Amino acid sequence: MKKRTYTLEKQSESTAQTVLMTWAKFQANLLPGIDLLHAIPNGGHRHINVARQMKREGVTSGVPDLCLPVARGGHHGLYIEMKAEHKRPKAGGAGGVDPAQVVWLRRLTEEGYLAVVCWGWEEAKRTIETYLKPEPPATYVPTFRERFLEIAVDGRIRTVRQIRDDLGLTESFNVTEALRSLQGALAAEAHAWRLRTHTLTSRAHVSIWWLEKRKETPTP
């Protein structure tokens, strides 16, 4: 009798999902949130009475096999429909995904979830790793007022044109009026700050107030 060989490429959908869940159990320290990954028992063959009871309990045809209820990258969560790798359609071909599954994947996407089909456990693994990877910290962008303040109190003498160039302003922007308005607002704020601390008496209190305020406010 010819000896049968077993390769990962010939894994059934059930086996691929089992391998994936086994891998996930050892990733808790590397991928925070993966411990919430769970299966949705919609497929498989069951006794007709059991199937009827499960349907009455809410089991619905087409719902993806796996759910990861962790919000990442603007998505509410991740849904994965598992498929056997060796059943992947050829390039340009269709098939492999039931109409009810297509409907569910589309509806979940419309509701803000990432819903995908993964062919084989390795593709599902890469999908989960990409989904759960740490997001880069947001780059702090100073407000226009903060940028204007930097120029107003850094001690450098600038012409109106230099101020426009430094801040990327158009010719129509009235720098003189803006500086006058800013000076008044800063003077009022700095005066209130000086009264609270009782430490400043010089004419440079606006510049000192701004530098101290920067120290008090942590940079995001």
Image (cartoon, rainbow, N blue to C red):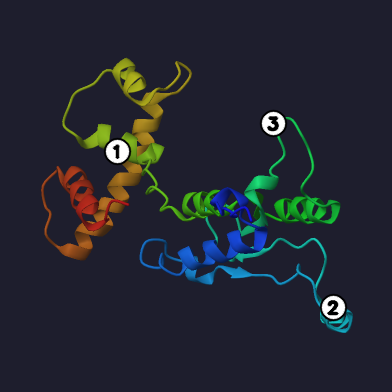
For residue 220, above or below residue 61:
above
Relative depth, front residue between 69 and 25: 25
**Please, what is the three-letter code of the amino acid marked with disc 2?**
Ala
In the rendered picture of this protein, how many numbered marks are placed on residues? 3
Q: Pointer 2: residues within 10 angstroms few (<14), some, or many (20+)?
A: some
Residue in view at x 41 percent, y 67 percent: 26
- Precedes in sequence: disc 2 or disc 1: 2
Residue in view at x 78 percent, y 56 percent: 104
Relative depth, front residue between 95 and 176: 95
**Please, what is the three-letter code of the amino acid marked with disc 1?**
Leu
Q: Of the numbered discs in the image, which one, if any, rests on residue 19?
A: none
Q: Of the numbered discs in the image, which one, if any, rests on residue 91?
A: 3
| Residue linked to disc 1 | 149
Q: Pointer 1: residues within 10 angstroms few (<14), some, or many (20+)?
A: some
* Front label number (2 vs 1): 2
Residue 46: x, y in percent? 80, 76
Relative depth, front residue between 86 and 149: 86
Q: Locate residue 178: give its quadrant.
A: top left
Q: Are marks 2 and 1 in contact (CB under 8 Å)?
A: no
